[in-house]
Each structure stands twice: as structure tokens, then as C-alpha cells.
Amino acid sequence: MEALVELGRGVFALRYRFYDQQVGVVVGDDGVAVIDTRSSHRQAQEIQRDLKRITPLPVTVVVNTHGHYDHAFGNRVFRPAPIWGHRRCVTMLEGTGEAQRTTFMAERPDLADDVTAVVIDPPDRTMDADATIDVGGRGLELRYLGRGHTDNDIVVRVPDAGVLFAGDLLENGAPPYFGDAFPMDWPDTVQRLASLVEGAVVPGHGDVGDAAFVAAQLVDLRRIARLAQEVHGGQLGLDDALARAPFPAASAREPLERALAQLRGDMPAA
Ligand SMILES: [Zn+2]
């Protein structure tokens, strides 16, 4: 573990150097919730070890903010705890989990043994819009706010501490990943997220932020959507749009191309 921050009473962000990832922890009276489980059983076991520095209580519930491997491939380690996620998080892990494993292995051949050993174990408790779950006497709100980084992102609100775990709807310090994104929907989703911010906002990757961080990311996401609309409408060439994008050109092509695919109707309607 790279850093441990207590954001409110019994609410922690555990930060890991690998992918600069944030894992959420909420400690209740007799149980603990873990938000996202990292990329392998070995990495999830590291979470378990780090939890011992915070509390002796057992993990009684897990939440996957979405169905990407770096948020869900550690799930198995926390069984028999129930695992919550959006209904389409299950669809994503069942439908693309093996492809994600292949991509991950190609990127990190040094981790091949760990990645091979992963038993993909999707959430067994699902939701479409909202759910409130109990963690040792504390209520956690799970909210689906619309498509964005994927079609199954949920945020986790800890009402009694004013903390919001945003998953990869927000990313701090690096351009967000658009490979499975819905860039035309993402800004409105983050607008709704912004209305839930009371204090600390924990992104899926990078520094813990606040309302100003959310507002800045919203500006970037709106800019991508607007540039795509101008390209789609014929007012702007793709190269000019790339040059005006809020991300470096290498990171801007995928968001614009996926936004254009949405505008052409090549991606499923919400
Ligand atoms: Zn992701």
C-alpha cells in the first residue's frame, strides 16, 4: 500500500502504486465494506493484509464500481462476502472477462501467473438504479447515475461521513479511459455525480479530490462531447478536434471516435 487516508470516521481510501488505484474501505460496528478488489487474487490479498492495520473486523460486503478487471478480478478472495454491482457489471464480466484477462496479460506478461490464477467471480447482488446496503450498522448508498466510463458505473455514497467513491467516472492526474465509454452520456452522468458531492470524492485512480476537481473533469468531458458534435456536424475536422481536445492527442482519439460512433448511432442507445 502506498498511502492510507481516513476521509471521515471509519472511511478510508487505500492507494496502491499499481495503476495508481484507490480502494475504498468503510468500517461499521461489526463488519467492513471494501469498494473494488484490484486486478488479481494476490493484489486482493494485499488489501486484506492492509485492512489488518485498520481494523480486526471481517469484510462483510464488497462493491464493484464497474466490471473492469482492475476493480473486480480480486473478488474471489473476499468470498463468501456478498458482492454488489450493477446488473450490467455482471454482464460485462461474464461477457468480456476472459478478453480482459487476455489484454491484461499481454500488457503485463510479468504478472502472467497471477492473472492466470484469477477466478472471475462477478457480483451476486445486483441493482439497476439505487440500492442501500448495510455495513455493520452503517448505510451505504449505491447509485447508478447513467452511462459514462462504461455502461455499468456506480458510485458509493457514505452519507454519515459525506464521502463519495466515484469509481472510474473520475480519474485524477491522467486522462480517463474511454475504451468502453459512452462519451456523449458521460458529462451528464458526472453532472449528476457532482450534485452528490459533499466533501471528499475518491476517483478510481489518482488523488482524492473535491467539488472543484469534479467540476474540472466535467469541463473536459463536455469539451470532448462538444468537439465530437462539431465534427459530426461538419463544422470541424477530426484533426482540428484532436488538437483542441483537453487530453494529449494520443489519448484524445479514442474518446472522440467513440463519441462520433455514438452520434452516428453505431452504439446502443441508453
Ligand atoms: Zn475502469
Image: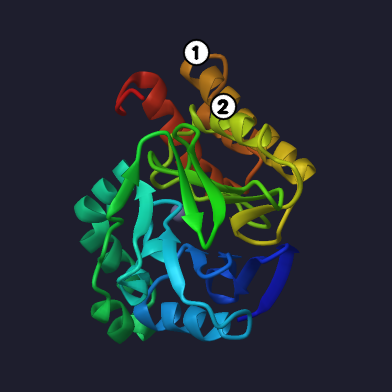
Count of number-bearing discs: 2
Residue 20 in the image: above or below residue 89: below
Residue 125 in the image: above or below residue 35: above
> From the viewer's perspective, is 236 left or right of 232?
right
Disc 2 to disc 1, how far (Cα)? 21 Å
Q: How crowded is the residue under tag 2: few (<14 C-alpha within 10 Å), some, or many (20+)?
A: some
Element class at badge 2: helix
Q: Find residue 243 and report its horizontal and vertical position in percent.
A: 63, 37
> Residue at the spot x=49%, y=33% of the render?
183
Res 188 label: 2
For badge 2, the amino acid type reads Asp
Depth check, front residue: 213 or 87: 87
For badge 1, the amino acid type reads Gly
Q: Point out the frontmost of discs 2 and 1.
A: 2
> From the viewer's perspective, is 267 left or right of 254?
left
Work out whether mark 2 precedes mark 1 in sequence or the reverse, and give the earlier one: 2
Res 48 label: none
Res 233 label: 1
Q: Quadrant of ligand 1?
A: bottom left
Q: Is residue 241 visible?
A: yes
> From the viewer's perspective, is 97 left or right of 31?
left
> Residue at the spot x=76%, y=42% of the render?
211
